[in-house]
């Protein structure tokens, strides 16, 4: 039932503090992460030559958000595959690989075909799904249910944030015996329980985002630039705009800006730059300067208190979000971009 909300999607966006709580329930204990579905397979995963994430659409974007911290915490090379592209290429897949299939429904045709392919090639197949009893859950060797609650809205929202949190927990579980990342691991484990509160905080931007969406009604197109932990936020934000506002939108890696897209920048093109505080912050500051020099119509997402350092001239629109541990920041940053494009 959608209750007081106009659409299921809107209800599911606002439900995220709760869905994230259920995703983590029973899985964080005394400075440790316990994923019942993976514990007997962690040894095999740790010995695999690479981890390949496979999915479509928003589920692929969640895997893209996971890649940086999965590599960092596991020390294993991570690659990504769009399910259809893996099948089109009949891409390389080996017995020493761990193939992780990400799917909200657990029934997406291309993802299931890619699973068949990975099983035939002898990879360890792990599922990350919201749907107990789905084909994906049944046919994978092991996996994790994201427990976000049924997702009815056609545009995926709460599943995306819960998928990322499950992949954070998975990275923590795989990397549990790595000495070099212990302090980072502890910081993330300590930050996770408060993440739902931070999501409640960012949901208060509802009216501000409505106002922003209204100001863009006449625009032909919208660019979203991100990098590092928030490259995925750019792709997923642009996907939400396409699906919900039915407006052309492109998510791009900020590092690629000068290799083509800059040619399109002028005062009519709105551009969202994600520049929350992390290791890539100063690079994003210089991207903002370059866009500014081209008179770009800038909307900057930054950490609370950073408005004047991302936009010294005061001429851009600023969306301030709460800051969390770097690898959890994509969970916060996507929320404003889910809101109010309808
Ligand atoms: C499980 C129970 C949960 C219970 C908890 C108590 C289920 C579905 N979950 O949760 O109700 O509260 O124990 O300890 O009964 N799996 C796959 N592929 C997938 C997803 C999951 O093979 O894509 C497998 C897992 O390897 C595992 C089982 O399904 O064997 C359940 O996974 P999950 O619900 O994530 O496990 P728990 O969190 O331990
Ligand atoms: C976007 C969206 C789709 C799905 C994609 C995969 O909002 O909903 O892009 O993410 O069709 O679906 P699942 O995750 O069910 O495999």
Image (cartoon, grey):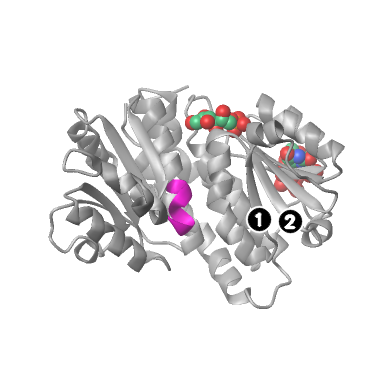
Q: What residue do we see at 18% from left, 38% from top?
A: 268
- Tell me: residue 145, above or below residue 111: below
Residue under pointer 1: 78
Residue under pointer 2: 50
CA distance separating discs 2 and 1: 6 Å
**Res. 126 image quadrant:** top right
Q: Magenta residues?
A: 226-233
Kindly state the secondary structure of the residue where label 2 is placed: strand
Residue 231 lies in magenta, yes or no? Answer: yes
Q: Are marks 2 and 1 in contact (CB under 8 Å)?
A: yes
- Crowd band around label 2 with a 10 angstrom C-alpha radius: few (<14), some (14–19), many (20+): many
Where is residue 129? Give x, y as percent.
66, 37
Where is residue 217? Give x, y as percent.
21, 28
Where is residue 166? Give x, y as percent.
62, 49
Residue 114 lies in magenta, yes or no? Answer: no
Residue 230 visible in rendering: yes
> In screen coordinates, is 316 left or right of 130?
left
Nearer the observer, 55 or 167:
55
């Amino acid at each position: 039932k959608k209750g007081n909300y106009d659409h299921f999607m809107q209800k599911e966006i606002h439900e995220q503090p709760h869905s994230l709580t259920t995703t983590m329930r029973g899985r964080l204990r005394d400075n440790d992460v316990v994923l019942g579905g993976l514990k007997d397979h962690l040894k095999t995963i740790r010995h695999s030559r690479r981890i390949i994430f496979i999915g479509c659409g928003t589920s692929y974007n969640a895997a893209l958000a996971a890649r940086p911290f999965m590599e960092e915490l596991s020390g294993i090379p991570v690659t990504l595959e769009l399910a259809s592209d893996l099948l089109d290429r009949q891409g390389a897949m080996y017995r020493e690989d761990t193939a992780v299939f990400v799917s909200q429904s657990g029934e997406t045709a291309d993802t299931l075909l890619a699973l068949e392919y990975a099983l035939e090639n002898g990879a360890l197949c792990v599922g990350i799904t919201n749907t107990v009893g789905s084909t994906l859950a049944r046919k994978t060797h092991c996996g994790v249910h994201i427990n976000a609650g049924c997702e009815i809205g056609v545009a995926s929202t709460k599943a995306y944030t819960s998928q990322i949190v499950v992949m954070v927990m998975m990275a923590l579980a795989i990397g549990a015996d790595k000495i070099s990342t212990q302090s980072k691991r502890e910081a993330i484990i300590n930050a996770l329980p408060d993440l739902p509160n931070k999501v409640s905080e960012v949901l208060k931007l509802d009216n501000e985002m409505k106002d922003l969406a209204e100001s863009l009604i006449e625009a032909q197109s919208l660019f979203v630039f991100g990098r590092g932990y928030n490259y995925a936020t750019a792709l997923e934000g642009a996907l939400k705009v396409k699906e919900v506002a039915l407006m052309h939108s492109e998510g791009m890696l900020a590092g690629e800006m000068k290799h083509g897209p800059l040619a399109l920048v002028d005062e009519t093109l709105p551009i969202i730059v994600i520049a929350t505080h992390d290791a890539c912050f100063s690079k994003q500051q210089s991207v903002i300067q370059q866009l500014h020099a081209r008179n770009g119509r800038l909307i900057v997402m930054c950490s609370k208190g950073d408005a004047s350092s991302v936009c010294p001239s005061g001429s851009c629109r600023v969306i301030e979000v709460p800051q969390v541990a770097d690898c959890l920041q994509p969970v916060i940053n996507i929320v404003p971009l889910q809101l109010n494009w309808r």
